[in-house]
Image: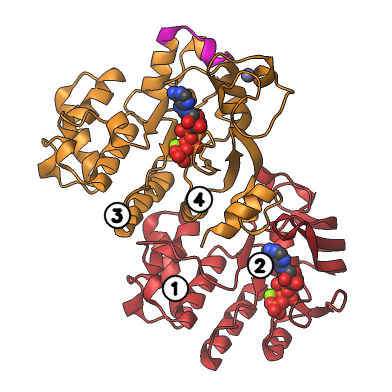
Chain colours: A red, B orange
Amino acid sequence: MVRINGLSKVFKMHILKGKTIEGFKDVTCSVKPGQALGIKGKSGKGKSSVLKCIYRTYMPSRGAIEYDSKSYGVIDLARANEHEIINIRKSEISFITQFLHIIPRVTAIDVVAEPLLGSGVGVDEARERAAGVLTELGIPKALFDAFPSTFSGGEKQRINIARSVIKAPRLLLMDEPTASLDKKSTMTVVELLKGLKAKGTTMIGAFHDMWVMEQISDSIYEMDGGL
Amino acid sequence: MIKKPVLKARNITKIFGKGCPTCLDDDSDFEGNICPDCKSVVGCKNISFDLYPNEVLGIVGESGSGKSTLVRMLYLDIEPTKGEMFLEFDGDLGDDGFSGLPAQAIGANIFSAKSFVKRHIKNFFFGMVYQSAQLGLKLDVTAGGNIVERMLMANNRDIKKMRARASYLLGKTEIPVERMDEPPKNFSGGMQQRVQIAKAISNEPAILLLDEVTTGLDVSVQAKVLDLIRTLQNEIKVSMLVVSHDLGVIRLLTNRTIVMKNGRIIESGLTDQILEDPQEEYTQILVNSAL
Ligand SMILES: Nc1ncnc2c1ncn2[C@@H]1O[C@H](COP(=O)(O)OP(=O)(O)OP(=O)(O)O)[C@@H](O)[C@H]1O
Ligand SMILES: Nc1ncnc2c1ncn2[C@@H]1O[C@H](COP(=O)(O)OP(=O)(O)OP(=O)(O)O)[C@@H](O)[C@H]1O
Ligand SMILES: [Mg+2]
Ligand SMILES: [Mg+2]
Ligand SMILES: [Zn+2]
C-alpha cells in the first residue's frame, strides 16, 4: 500500500545563516494493505519527520513515497501536487498528530464530527457517529458540548484521535498517539486502533511506548541513521 | 477529478506612480518596493495564482506587501497596471435565481471587459469584506439597509423578501435582529465586521474576498468571526481568499497559502507545510517571529 524508497529530509535554515539540519536519511520501508508498520528509534532520529513527509507537512528532499491511492492509482506523495494532496487528505489519509489544534468556539463533539460534514454526511448522523467514537474513547457525555480548550491534555488528545479516525481512513498516520494518555485511556486507544485495523485501515505510526507498538504493529522499522 | 479554477490570476502588476521599464518589465527585478529608476511604488508585481471551487486560499505577508492592493484589483475597485484575471463558473449560485457569469465574461480577461460586465461580476460573482468597515459599509445607513442595497444591485426587487433575508443573515452573524434598523456607526468593530460579512454573502457570491477580517478585534470577537467564516465554508461552499497577517487565522481557515513580500509572491504551498517547513528565508522569518 505504501512503499518508501530512499527517503531523506534536510532542513535548510536560512535564518541560521543557511545551516542545514538532517531530519533523517535514506529511509526505505513498506506496509501492506490492512497492516500496521511501527517506526522505532531514539529521540531525534526523525520518526516524526518521516510521518510528516508522508502527509506532506514536510517537503521531502530526496526519495519517493509510492502510495496506492483510491483516487489516483499509484501516486508518489513526495511529488504529488497540492490539490492531489488536499483531496487525498480529505478522503483517504488521516494523521493523528501529537497535539490537538484547538478550534475556537467549536464543541468537542463538533470538532470530531466536522470531517464527516465535509464529505456530505448530515449534521445529525455526523454527531451521532462522533458521540459513538467519543464514548468508545471514554470521554464522558458531559464533555461533548464543552470546549476542548478547557480540557486536560489526555482528554484533548482523545478528541484529536477521535477526529482523525471518525472517517475510518484508508491510511492512518500516527505520531505518538498515546504519549499524553494514562494507562487506562492508552488501552482504550489500542483497542480502537485494533478495531480499525481489523476493518481494513492501513497504519504507519511512531510510538515511544513499546507495549503499544507491539500491540498494534505487524512489522517494525528501526531508524538508526543520522545522529 | 480536480476541478477547474474558479479564478485565474495571471501576471497582475500594480505600480503606483508613472512607471518605467524597470518596474514594468515582467523579467526585471530589484530589491524592495520602490522602483530604483522612477521611484514609483510597486503595489503588486507579477502575481499569478489559481483559486479552486470551494477552496480557501490564504495570503500572508507583512504590512505593505500588497495584499489589500491585490484583493482590491480582483474586486475591480482599482485597475491593475497590467495583468489578467479569468473567471469560470459552472454551477448554480443558489436557488434565488442569481445568475452566474455573463456571456461576455467567459474566457475573457475581466480587467479589460466592458464596464457593465465588470459591474455584473462585482454585484453577482464576488463578495468583499474590507479591512476597514468604512470602505465596506455606509456607516450612516442602517445595517439592514446596507444589506438590502447590496441585494438591489444584484437585481433583487422584492423588498419584503430582501428584508427577511437581511434579518436572517444578521441572525447568522449574531447581530441582534432588533438592531437591524440602527446604523453601523453605533456598532462595535466586531459587529461592523459581521455586518460586512452579512452584506458580502447576501448575493450568494461564488468568491468571497476577506481582507483582514479579524484584525483589531479582541480575541473573543475574533473567535466569533472566525467561527462564522468556518460555518459559511461548510454551509454555502463559496471559494474564499483570506488575507491576514495572523498565521493562526491562516492555519485555522485555509488549505493553501501564498506568501507575499514587496508586492511579489515569495512562496506558496499547503498551509501546514508553509507553517512547519517553510522553504524561503522570508517565510522562515515570518513563521519564527510568530508565537
Ligand atoms: N521543522 C523543522 N525544522 C528544522 N529541523 C527540524 C524540523 N523538524 C524536525 N527537525 C529536526 O530533525 C531531526 C529529527 O526530528 P524528529 O522530530 O523527526 O525526531 P523524532 O524521531 O520524532 O524524535 P522524538 O522521538 O523526540 O519525537 C531533529 O534533529 C530535529 O531537530
Ligand atoms: N493609492 C496608493 N498610492 C500609492 N501607494 C499606495 C496606494 N495604495 C497602496 N500603496 C502602497 O502599496 C503598498 C502595498 O499596500 P497594501 O495596502 O496593498 O499593503 P498590505 O499588504 O495590505 O498591508 P497591510 O497588512 O498593512 O494592510 C504599500 O507600500 C502602500 O503604501
Ligand atoms: Mg517525534
Ligand atoms: Mg492591507
Ligand atoms: Zn520604475
Instruction: Identify the chain of the residue marked 3, using the numbered disc in the image.
Output: B
The residue under label 1 is: A132
Q: Are marks 1 and 2 on the same chain?
A: yes
The residue under label 2 is: A172
Q: Residue at x 22, y 41 (%)?
A: B170
Specify which label sits upstream in the sequence, 4 or 3: 3
Q: Secondary structure at mark 2?
A: strand
Q: Amino acid at mark 2?
A: Leu
Q: Are marks 1 and 4 on the same chain?
A: no
Instruction: Identify the chain of the residue marked 1, using the numbered disc in the image.
Output: A
- Foreground mark, 2 or 3, reads 3
x and y, in percent, of residue A193 in the image: 62, 77
Compared with residue B69, is residue A3 higher up or lower down, i.e. above or below? Answer: below
The residue under label 4 is: B250
Q: CA distance from mark 4 to mark 3?
A: 17 Å
Q: Residues within 10 Å of mark 2 (few under 14, many from 20)?
A: many
Q: Secondary structure at mark 1?
A: helix
Q: Amino acid at mark 4?
A: Ile
- Magenta span contains residue A162: no
Q: Residue at x 37, y 75 (%)?
A: A150
